[in-house]
Image: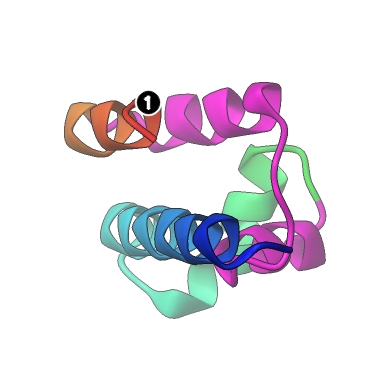
Amino acid sequence: MEKNKEKMLKRLGRIIKKARIKKYKSDRSLREFSRDVDMSHQAVKNIENGKVEPKKETLLKIAHTLRSEEHTSELQSH
């Protein structure tokens, strides 16, 4: 993976994780959030760690689940 893309994916993952923890009030919320977005907890963890490039549909599902205008607009700008 090229360096710029790798940095962008890691930044995106940090944004998603921060929004998830803020909404679910705990870092232990990964499994609960995973159920809400209909994904495995490992898939969400890989996205949050910047290890995979999620599809646009996946990002929209995550943004919709988080329902935070601040983070949704931040996700859409990337």
The residue located at (57%, 55%) in the rendering is 5
Residue 41 painted magenta: yes
The residue located at (32%, 53%) in the rendering is 19
Q: Position of residue 41 (x, y in %)?
A: 75, 63
Q: Using the image, determine if residue 68 lies above or below residue 48.
A: above
In the image, the segment drawn in magenta is 40-68
Q: Find residue 78 and report its image quarter.
A: top left
The residue pinned by badge 1 equals 76
Tag 1: residue type? Gln
Q: Nearer the viewer, residue 45 or 66?
A: 45
Secondary structure predominantly adopted by residues drawn in magenta = helix
Q: Find residue 25 and report its image quarter.
A: bottom left
Q: Quadrant of the N terminus?
A: bottom right
In the picture provided, is 12 more to the left or to the right than 61?
A: left
Q: Position of residue 8 (x, y in %)?
A: 47, 56
Q: Position of residue 3 (x, y in %)?
A: 57, 68
Residue 27 painted magenta: no
